[in-house]
Amino acid sequence: MTPRRRLPFLDGLRGIAALAVMAFHFNIFFLPQAQIFELLPFLTRAYLSVDLFFILSGFVMAYVYGNRLSYDRKSHWREFSRARFLRIYLLFFLSSLSMTILFLLFRTGLSGVTFSDRSLLLQPLLLQQWCGLSWNYPSWSISTEAEAYVFFIFFAGYLLRGKHPALLAVSCFATLLALCVAKGGSLNCYGGISALIRTISEFSLGVLLYRAHLKWIGLRRTWTPALSVFLILAGKTTNFDALIVSGLGCFISYGVNATGAFALLLNSSPLIALGNWSYSIYMWHAPIHYGVMVALNVAGYPSETLSKSTARFLILLTGLVVIWFSATSYRYLELGVRHSVVSLGRRQPSAA
């Protein structure tokens, strides 16, 4: 399968979301005394950036692979599986291996993260989500993302060509709403069946959003920005994350065909570059901040003893290191994998 043209708007949005997740995790697992949420209160719900990733993933998978999988799954599922596995696995493996080596050498724990033997055995199989947060802890979503790919192979036709797409979208939203009720309004579920339900529902919404995009393409939908703002504000007021997620979906719908200053911003070179680096930022930020913690401990300055101002400066410095390292990772790892995927697709007769 030869990848289709990229959508720059989605790259820019993904880059912003990756930075938000990094800042959220730094505040919880790295230097909580920095009190980043006090400085930037909107980051208290930055975990919903992962929900944005899931919706974007469904949209992009439908855009790139949906037509072939929905009409001829048997001829294309192997190419799809191979391409997606190559895309996500190498970086996941290398970043998780780095985290594993650091822990085995220095045995420094992280509150809320397990380093058990059972969870380690599940890592290579992309099943780590069934142990909650473990080892390279952001990778729980890579586990559920892989499961969403399997789901897409079997249900692409149903989502993209089946009857009553509006009813399907309402069902996905109702599922998220029920999950919110069960979790006290939050969608911050990162383990077990609840994490899988969260992922599949939002991935499906992304696929259905692409279907709606095809139907409405070329039309000026001036109501989507207002609806997006309304749903996000309603979600913040009621503390129901499902409403915010729905608002993010409307935002994506608007942004794909947006014009003017807003489009110029998200299609700008710096944000597109950040979007290109977003997967590396997501996968490397935990091993890198963990490495900084280990280095501080070895030097005799445990991270928990740092002052608020020092902690904030160190978060900024570490974030810049993550971005630089991710740019390098993208250039020398991800682009190589992408070229392999394209070459492999060209060699497949069914990819034409």
Image: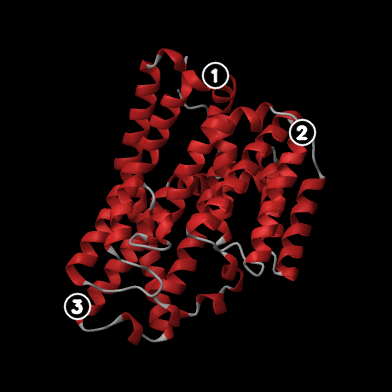
Image location of residue 295, percent across then percent down: 23, 73
Instruction: State how far apart marks 3 and 2 are (Cα).
Output: 60 Å
Image location of residue 56, percent across then percent down: 58, 44
Please identify the quarter of the rendering in which residue 120 is found: bottom left
Image location of residue 297, percent across then percent down: 24, 79
What kind of element bears circle 1?
loop
The image quadrant where one finds the N terminus is top left
Instruction: State how far apart marks 1 and 2 are (Cα).
Output: 21 Å
Q: Which callout, 3 or 2, points at the residue further toward the start of the chain?
A: 2
What kind of element bears circle 2?
loop
Label 1 crowding class (10 Å Cα cut-off): few <14, some 14-19, many 20+? few
Left or right? Give the position of 349 relative to 231. Answer: left
Q: Which callout, 1 or 2, points at the residue further toward the start of the chain?
A: 1
What residue is pinned by disc 2?
Answer: 164
Depth check: 318 or 45 in front? 45
**Relative to 46, is 335 above or below?**
above
Label 3 amino acid?
Val
Q: Which residue is drawn at 51% across and 42% down?
A: 148
Q: Which residue is drawn at 39% across and 61% down?
A: 137
Label 2 crowding class (10 Å Cα cut-off): few <14, some 14-19, many 20+? few
Label 2 amino acid?
His
What residue is pinned by disc 1?
Answer: 72
